[in-house]
Image (cartoon, coloured by chain):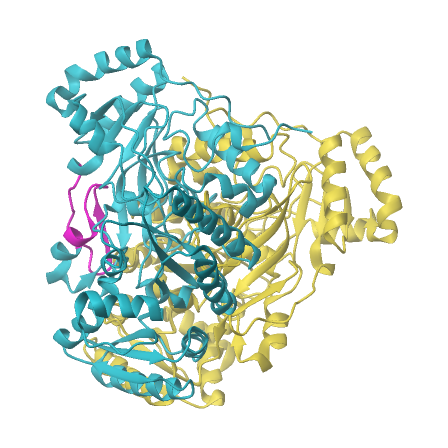
Chain colours: A yellow, B cyan
């Protein structure tokens, strides 16, 4: 297998030619205004903004096809854009080109209650979808922090607190309509719940970060809204006991709906920020859902099981109001962390390790922070082995900024060393590209490069994300 | 994207050269004996056997690498082989070459209870794995009918009765070690439960039917053995009421462990064959598992829910003995069908449609059988929309054999027309290759072909399966 060919950077002439083709079709839905470009070159990460040369707002598949064919002909990069809430610079126009803002492709078709599916445009956000679904008795469970678009969530293989029970975006896409680099339309799968019919194009597109094509429609898997929900907040004397308790709960076979970890530093930060009356200590938030009787019995077992790990406090909640109070601790985690230092910035990390190595990974991360003099509360989707540090730092302090770099490097290298991954749910973008070969090996990276080149030989689809020609060493 | 290049059929000289390289390494583990070759050219399908030129029995990764490098150099086809229980001619050596019998790579590493994972060689069979796991409190749920090998189950994206709760092979592979066509070793993923790190090589290899590489090791996801299990056998007056009841159960959000359908013809065949005292009628077998209290309450709800669909009889079972008696109806289905006509052969079909279209698909299949004068009991994994006809026919009767062809064609075309797939769990092999373009469209097939060519440019990996150069029309 070869490397992808060297990037064909959009020349000014090529760009002008492409824009000249697109302007009559898109009219005011093609913008080169600087504020619009600036807004589309920056995501939620701390990576530098790189604005595209223009922003297009397609409203249907035919327009996307026309834009792609045009950009393919002229070798102009195309960067698909959802809500700009990605965390690794996914939308930065590293090689210029045209940003495709998909927000106007936001139709939602009626849900199929029998199939528990719903077809949506890529620009629909997860909260909009759930509001639309409310009367159907169904819901869409994948819940990254932001109100991200479905297209973006698919492209970054997003997950969130519900993943331990319901799975990630990888488990919620029945079928996609994708426009490939040359304008070819492909449907990745039928609408059947499972299939053994050829290569899994569906999973190939999920997590591809817009580097293999543009998602123009998605049929999603939904779930019945549970009748009852109970939540417990349990504070432990150490991270090890909290995580060991989580492992015991997972191993019990109880169908836990959510199980989140907040370390002592995070809990103190939240208490200082939100005044929720939380006890200090490494904390688990555990939730069960289903029919009321089953849920209350499962919750009783969980608190009984937790008793073996010497918890400091156990608080359970049934009512929506009480449960919301518990979850507020988790929802406020990011803002509470940043508030620890007025004027500071936050960087979210995203390691994911085998659950058996999680306690070790968390402890080592804490030691790193102490070594480097950094403040970084930790929270995580402990059932999946996925944890985030919110690294709080002053970007104008050069030493601190270097120490943050060192911390990020150690976290990525350690995740790999422990058999895990450098990203559980945020993706690679260009922020983590330099570690991808360490995780997958050169052979793995070459395999990915071969796939990329096969589907996008001109390297126009979100170039510079996940993999780029220079990432691979020359052949022997 | 281009088509895969024309197949390089193994020339006699190339084959001799490759065998000359391999013989010193493999000794008696390289065989050209006709009985050995015959045995490896035939799977469980009714498709004609096509024996390979030789059979190799590698015992470790280094041997697989050496074999692949050798075959790559000499452009000799390589056909990975598990237990030969595939259903669409997957192991037929359509272009000659060397069969890799993986049965001796059958090590099982100790399970990680905390991570609920286990690493195995590809030659381990599912029953062997579960026997090994028994004392760990964990089990591996994917259960195709045969005692297939893990490597084969991964390669065909197999599933079975447990898929409705636990998912298919696609949901049970944490990470794979794969040797690619040119001998390159790739690990498809880390050991983390989830990841957003680049293209999903893991899912690309699952279901690839040995056409992209040879699986040499797999880390599998396991589950806690449930404490209690209850089973219900419910007979209905029609297929529509049985299937509507299944949809209602699925939509209730109850965590059903298994939900299987057997049509009236199948039930009568089983009763005639096994004398289990079954009532006639389209039948569901529904199973719940978990803690004893929850399970018995869930089962009570299920029978209550079923009452709305006017069941003829409802039988529930708690003890292993009673449950086994119920499941015997399902396990004997195939043999009971074939016994309907002494001397007849059976062909298993494998449509999978959205659950909302399942009743329609089953009814239409019955009408087809009546039209064509064919006997074909139906059973299926109704929670997934996946159903099998066991077509019983006399292969020496030309008219009947032609009618079987017509039936198979109608089933595949109808599955596609109803938004489903031509194969839910058996795969494409070469038996269903001709329908793959109808399901995925030419653009989908071209995309698959591009991936195939990127990873196996010489087309030596199980050539002629899933996709072949002649399947694509010339470019415009």
- Residue A327 is left or right of residue A147, and the answer is left
Q: Nearer the viewer, residue A285 or B35?
A: B35
Highlighted magenta segment, given as a residue range? B105-129
Residue A81 in percent (x, y) is at 67, 52
Confirm whether the magenta stretch covers residue B125: yes
Relative to A59, is A274 above or below? below
Is residue B128 on the magenta stretch?
Answer: yes
Determine the residue positioned at 36% across, 49% down: B426
Total marks in image? 0
The reply, left or right, for residue A168 in relation to residue B312 is right
Q: Nearer the viewer, residue A28 or B96?
A: B96
Q: Is residue B145 above or below residue A434?
A: below
Residue A194 visible in the picture? no
Seen in the picture, residue A292 relative to A36 is either above or below; the reply is below
Q: Residue at x 32, y 78 (%)?
A: A235
Viewer-proximal residue among B103 and B339? B339
Q: Please name the predominant secondary structure of the magenta segment in the image.
A: loop
Instruction: Tell me where residue A20 appears, x and y as whole percent.
Output: 86, 38
In this rendering, does residue A233 appear at all? yes
| Quadrant assignment for the C terminus of chain A | top left
Q: Position of residue B130 (x, y in %)?
A: 17, 57
Residue A27 is left or right of residue B288, and the answer is right
Residue A217 in picture, x, y percent from top left: 63, 56
Taking the spot 18% from the left edge, 73% from the top edge, the residue there is: B276
Q: Residue at x 23, y 72 (%)?
A: A252
**In the image, residue B220 above or below residue A280:** above
């Amino acid at each position: 297998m070869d490397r992808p060919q060297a990037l064909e950077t959009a020349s000014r002439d090529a760009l002008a030619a492409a824009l000249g083709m697109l302007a009559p079709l898109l009219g005011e839905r093609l913008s080169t205004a600087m504020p619009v470009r600036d807004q589309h070159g920056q995501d939620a990460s701390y990576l530098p903004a790189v604005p595209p040369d223009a922003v297009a707002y397609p409203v249907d598949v035919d327009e996307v096809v026309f834009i792609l064919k045009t950009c393919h002909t002229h070798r102009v990069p195309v960067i698909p854009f959802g809500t700009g809430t990605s965390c690794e610079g996914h939308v930065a126009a590293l090689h210029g080109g045209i940003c495709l803002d998909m927000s106007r492709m936001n139709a939602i078709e009626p849900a199929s209650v029998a199939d528990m599916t719903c077809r949506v445009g890529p620009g629909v956000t997860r909260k909009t979808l759930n509001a639309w679904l409310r009367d159907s008795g169904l819901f869409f469970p994948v819940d990254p922090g932001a109100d991200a678009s479905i297209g973006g969530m698919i492209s970054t293989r997003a997950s969130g607190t519900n993943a331990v029970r319901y799975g990630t975006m990888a488990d919620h896409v029945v079928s996609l309509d994708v426009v490939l680099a040359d304008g070819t339309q492909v449907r990745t799968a039928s609408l059947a719940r499972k299939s053994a019919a050829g290569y899994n194009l569906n999973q190939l597109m999920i997590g591809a970060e817009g580097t293999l094509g543009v998602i123009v429609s998605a049929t999603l898997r939904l779930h019945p809204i549970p009748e009852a929900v109970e939540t417990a907040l349990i504070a432990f004397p150490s991270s090890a006991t909290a995580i060991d308790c989580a492992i015991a709960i997972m191993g019990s076979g109880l169908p836990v709906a959510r199980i989140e970890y907040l370390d002592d530093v995070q809990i103190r930060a939240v208490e200082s920020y939100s005044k929720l009356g939380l006890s200090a200590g490494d904390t688990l938030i555990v939730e069960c859902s289903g029919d009321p009787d089953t849920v209350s019995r499962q919750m009783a077992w969980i608190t009984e099981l937790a008793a073996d790990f010497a918890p400091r406090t156990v608080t359970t909640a049934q009512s929506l109001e009480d449960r919301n109070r518990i979850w507020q601790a988790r929802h406020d985690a990011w803002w509470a962390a940043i508030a620890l230092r007025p004027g500071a910035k936050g960087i979210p990390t995203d390691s994911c390790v085998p659950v058996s190595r999680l306690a070790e990974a968390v402890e080592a991360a804490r030691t790193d922070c102490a070594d480097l003099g950094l403040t970084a509360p930790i929270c995580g989707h402990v059932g999946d082995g996925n944890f985030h540090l919110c690294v709080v730092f002053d970007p104008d302090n050069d030493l601190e900024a270097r120490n943050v770099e060192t911390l990020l490097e150690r976290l990525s290298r350690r995740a790999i060393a422990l058999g895990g991954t450098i990203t559980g749910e945020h993706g690679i973008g260009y922020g983590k590209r330099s570690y991808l070969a360490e995780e997958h090996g050169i052979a793995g990276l070459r395999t990915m490069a071969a796939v990329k080149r096969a589907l996008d030989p001109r390297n126009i689809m979100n170039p510079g994300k996940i993999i780029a020609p220079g990432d691979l060493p020359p052949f022997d």
